[in-house]
Amino acid sequence: MKSRMKPWQILLIISFLLITLLEYKSISRAEINALGDWSSFTDMNSANEFKFDGELVWGAAPGGAFAIDSDGSVQQKLTNIEGLKGLELNAVEIDSAGNLWLASQNGTLNKFDSDGNYLTYYFIFKRRNVIDEPLVLYDLHADGEWLWIARQEGISKFSIYNNGGEIQENIEHAGPFSREDIKTVFVENDRIWFGFEEGVGYADKDSPYLPDGSEWTVFYEGNPQGLTNFDVRSISYFQGQLYAGTASGVFQFHESADSGWWDVSGLGGSAINSLRASADTLFAATDNGPYFNSGASWNQYNPTGYSGMEISDLAYIPGEGLVVAYSDIGYAKFSGQWEEFFIPGPRGLSCEEIIAAEDNLWAFSRGSRDEPGTAVNHYDGASWQNFNASNSGLVNNIFYTAAIDSSGRTWIGYWGKGLSVYDPSDSSWASFDSTNSPLLGVLSEGEASNYIVITALTLDAQNNLWIGNFRAFDSHAAYVLQPDSTWNEIPESDEDGLSNDLFTRIVVRGDKVMFATEEGLDVLDVGSGFKVESDNQWRHFDVNSGLISNIVYDVDIDRNDYIWIATGQGLNYYDPEFDYVDSLPLPFGFGPTINALEIDGLGNKWIGTSDGLLKLSADNSDWISYTTENSLLVNNEVLALSLVNATGVLWIGTSGGISRFDTGQEMPDPTVSSVSTYPSPAGPKFADRVYFSRVPFGAEIRIYTVAGELVRKLDAGNDGGLTSWNYKNDSGESCAGGVYIYHVINRGKDYSKTGKMVLIR
């Protein structure tokens, strides 16, 4: 007689057919370092969860993880540079061995040791039609050898130690519910509890039949048992009782002979974002701030001096006090009195505008009427400053574009408020609108308003500020502000001149001023000067000229005078010698929209897309891609680029933070005085060759032993613009370790430099 399968067995098989998979990855620190000289700067000022490890408070934020002490001082940061995969974190947990676990929005489960050193990560995903679809991880709970994971479409029971870490079971059915997004998990004695937007439930954590929905008791609208709000966001256990925090109040669970029942504990009407229990107190993070219950009733925690802001989570530090995470931005700690603080770094998760000059970086996310920007961020190579309308001379927080002049002053263009300038020499601010400048606002009731929209700024070699006045009244489209404060207008023209005022970017290269707009590209050749109109020549490019799209986001000129044009549908270039426009397809998987473009001193094109960063070689023959998979790029959605040609440093603004990449593609130095070698020391242990940077084309490099014996002669120009030595002599034999002398002389034989390098075998 054939035996019939039990329902739980059928469900178990179905759960494996729909399988939630786990990919295990271990990357060494050396492998991370080999990905290049990268740095990441992210906003960690809106933590989703806190966890106190007995000494430090760890926070899981959209920009990574951090650890602070009781004073709010940052002791550690974890980003992709430290090995974190998936920076948008939802949860942090600490297991019995002290290891740190971090759950991310992109399905990665990261593991670090107790000192914050990277160990490994796991990728939790579902395979649908041969496509790996990441599952969002919402919460973690450590229970001995197990880690319970609340995730999109269910719960995973994860074994911490088996086979280096593996999923033991996937639970996608509970009571009448299937594949719900589970927002919180909690272990209480022998039960595993979960909460989601439609209720709360539990089962025996050791049951072998957890994938069977009938194993679970669920309280929801159809089985409330006293529960009146079903959006359960947090679960905790305090003084022998289980509590659930909901979108409207805290509920207490009572055991009964059957399934149990609930009653209101307190804080009715308040959204409870988190519950945290200490030895003698239950704390609640609510939309009205922190509350506590010592066993009798709920009370506001030290309300005197508190801002009243909603908090997403809190942590209690015994003997010190409370640390809270504001749901909006920032933190506060109480140790006798409330004190607000921030994690140093840029504010605002995305970066749509970035401008750099040496160690002088300005970056921000553009603001809008409905969603003002967070801050205009400044980085001097060591520390960050964050400017907004409440702590500086910024007129408001709807900033849009920026430029740095030769005096080090920073110009800020607003969407609606004109122009401001910051002078770091005396920390002063000045602003310009229709009351003190020729700038005009958009049309309002038949006349110009003071709503002045500046969408593009740049400086030329004479320190003239070029200003794009978007949608200005009566075609007053662009202006040039000279260093002597003289204003010059470049009006919109139906004939030979500026074709429209829908500016996205203005770029000046030599005597060419290029206006990228939403209706094509206008190029002005100023000749002997922009004020000599008879010497000005205009050229307009649009789809009728060969552009793939009229929407132009960026533009640049290479050393052969080709104009490269980044559009909403791909990459164009203009050949001035043969006077034609052509296009170049991007590599598969990138584009078509190009958000940003920079050309380095060696002629390489750096292209920012929503799928990653691309590098096109100077001869336009080779592509190199940089993504979060093969590099330390902080996020694949590249929104802005700024290249410091003198150093070869590329600053990259993305939707997930800022990356700094030392490309090694520095502007060649015709005097050869800036030529240097890297890595230092050199040798096969560090790289397969040693590079000479900033070597001008045609220069010659001779390498000698310390005894003066010629080892190798190199001609500049190989390796895509970087001259390199593969540690072999002119006969092709490998050279021994030791000190070597190099002598560089330029093509004209009028400049030279001598240096030394160490080769380690």
Image (cartoon, rainbow, N blue to C red):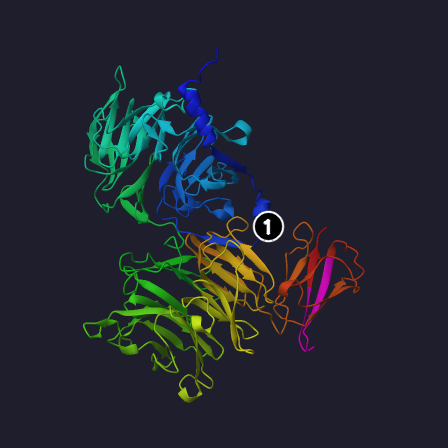
* Residue 60 visible in the current orientation: yes
Q: Give the structural element (helix, strand or loop) at label 1.
A: loop
Residue that extends furthest to the front in the rendered view of this protein? 1
**Taken as a whole, is the magenta stretch helix, strand or loop?**
strand
Q: What range of the chain is rendered magenta?
A: 739-755
Identify the residue position indicated by label 1 in the image. 34
Residue closest to the eye, 261 or 483: 261
Residue 304 x/y as whole percent: 21, 43
- Report the side of 420 relative to 602 (left or right): left
Q: Is residue 714 left or right of residue 396?
A: right
Residue 176 magenta-highlighted? no
Query: Image check: 609 left or right of 473?
Result: right
The x, y position of residue 252, in whole percent, is 24, 26
Please tell me which residue is depicted at 52% across the width and 48% down the height of the picture: 629
Q: What residue type is labelled 1?
A: Ala
Can you see residue 68?
A: no
Q: Which of 710 and 663 is in front in this view?
A: 663
